[in-house]
Image (cartoon, helix red, strand yellow):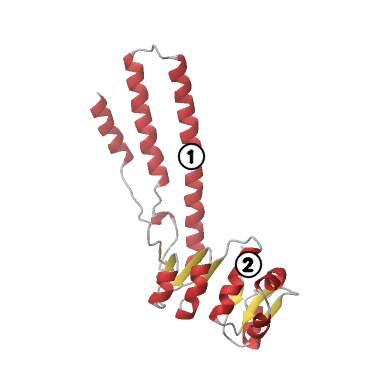
Amino acid sequence: LRSVMVTGDYRDTATAIAREIGLLRPGGRVVSGQELERMSVEELSSVAEEVDVYARVSPEHKVKIVEALKARGHVVAMTGDGVNDAPALASADVGVAMGTGTDVAMESAGVTLMSGDLRGLVTAIALSRATMGNIRQNLFWAFAYNAAGIAVALVGYDLAPEVTLSRIVDEAHALVFSGDTFGLSYRDFDVGDREFIFPTTTPVHFDPEALCRSVDRLMS
């Protein structure tokens, strides 16, 4: 992950803050809005890896920066809270709005940090990585388990009905435990007061043991 400062503040102010927080690397460049105005997306893309700070930028410049970074093959996340951030939030691969900002910014973004604290991004990234890890894990075990089941079905087509029924129950158990692994709880992350929301995502939790007992009773 690499962070870049994009701000409407003056060049000297942005440079001082970036240097103080360690964002400005040795040899890193600071580009102003006037310079951005003279650059095409292609020209900006050719130097984007060297730039750590963009100062005195306009909403159009922010979109240009996002497009230049995407042209370099980067997955771009943009944060913002104002109306002038909305175009860049919509252009980025992941738009992150502040819950303390404007409605326009939140509607343009895919993720909203409800407390407006940028440290919530750490939690959001951890949750995203855990989600992708669970998806990969579930796909792996689903393919492995069902491949083994197909092999058993091919060699054991004349097995007793009890064996076939047992196979169905095992499949139900695997589905239940797979779903429970996939369901993520916010309790697993140190969210604290840095809450965030994904507008279209709702975690689902259930008791897998109770469901397995119900399946067993139905099959008995």
Residue 94 % position (x, y): 51, 64
Of the image marks 1 and 2, the number of the one nearer the N terminus: 2
Q: Quadrant of the C terminus?
A: top left
Point out which mark residue 69 bears: 2
Residue 211 % position (x, y): 29, 37
Residue 193 % position (x, y): 40, 68
Q: Quadrant of the N terminus?
A: bottom right
Q: Residue at x 61, y 64 (%)?
A: 70
Q: Residue at x 46, y 23 (%)?
A: 150
Circle 2 — which element?
helix
Specify the farthest residue to the right. 27
Q: Residue at x 62, y 76 (%)?
A: 21
Q: Is residue 60 left or right of residue 154?
A: right
Q: Is residue 60 left or right of residue 25?
A: left
Quarter of the image for residue 68 reads bottom right
Q: Residue at x 37, y 58 (%)?
A: 200
Disc 1 versus disc 2: nearer the observer: 2
Circle 1 — which element?
helix
Q: Is residue 170 above or below residue 190?
A: above
Q: Which residue is mark 1?
A: 139
Q: Is residue 162 above or below residue 65?
A: above
